[in-house]
Amino acid sequence: MPVTLPHSVKKLLQDKAYGHVVTFNAQGKPQLTMVWMDVDGDEVTFNTAEGRNKPQNLRRDPRIIVSVQDRNDPQAYAVFHGKARVTETGADDHIDKLAKRFLNADKYPFRRPGEKRLIVRISVDRIGGFGPKMVPWS
């Protein structure tokens, strides 16, 4: 059952949050990738492109784990366990929003011709890790 994300977690995700995403390939083995993180309501989000392993893996097996470290307090980190869904809706605007946050660029500069952008939306079932001063997230 999805959890409500605490304000402190949303604040972490609205900063320049880099996430390490674990998806599972066709053989059930984990695949790890680093992405720019974001949040939308109680969903943890990130952007990717069609043809990459992440969306292929998630369409087959929606289980996902994401670890995010607080860049302002390296001892603070969150680990999100949940189910993901992949959508095209709003993905082009979303990657430009992230480019502004992470690169201070108005448009995502690494887009390839014909590339289809995707948003991965994570319904979080459990949050692990520790917030500031080694206190569990709340």
Image (tube, rainbow, N blue to C red):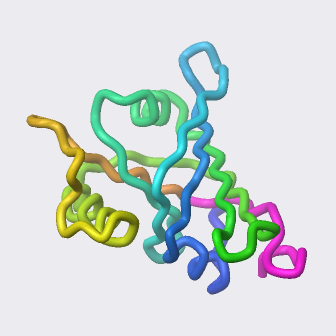
Q: Position of residue 43 (x, y in %)?
A: 50, 66
17, above or below 63, in the image: below
Does 55 appear in magenta? no
Could you say where residue 24 lies in the image, as x and y percent from the top left? 60, 28
- Compared with residue 106, is residue 8 higher up or lower down, i.e. above or below? below
Q: Going 67% across and 69% down the picture, which residue do you hit?
A: 70
The region drawn magenta spans 123-138
Within the image, what quadrant is residue 131 found in?
bottom right
Between 3 and 11, which is closer to the camera in this rendering? Answer: 11
User: In the image, is residue 136 part of the stretch drawn in magenta?
Assistant: yes
Residue appearing at x 78%, y 81% in the figure: 138
Q: Is residue 128 left or right of 54 when viewed as pictured?
A: right
In the picture as drawn, the residue positioned furthest to the left comes out as: 113
Nearest the camera: 99 or 117?
Answer: 99
The residue sitting at 66% across, 21% down in the picture is 29
Viewer-proximal residue among 17 and 43: 17
- Residue 1 is situated, as x and y percent measured from the top left of the image, at 67, 61
Query: For residue 27, which quarter of the picture?
Result: top right
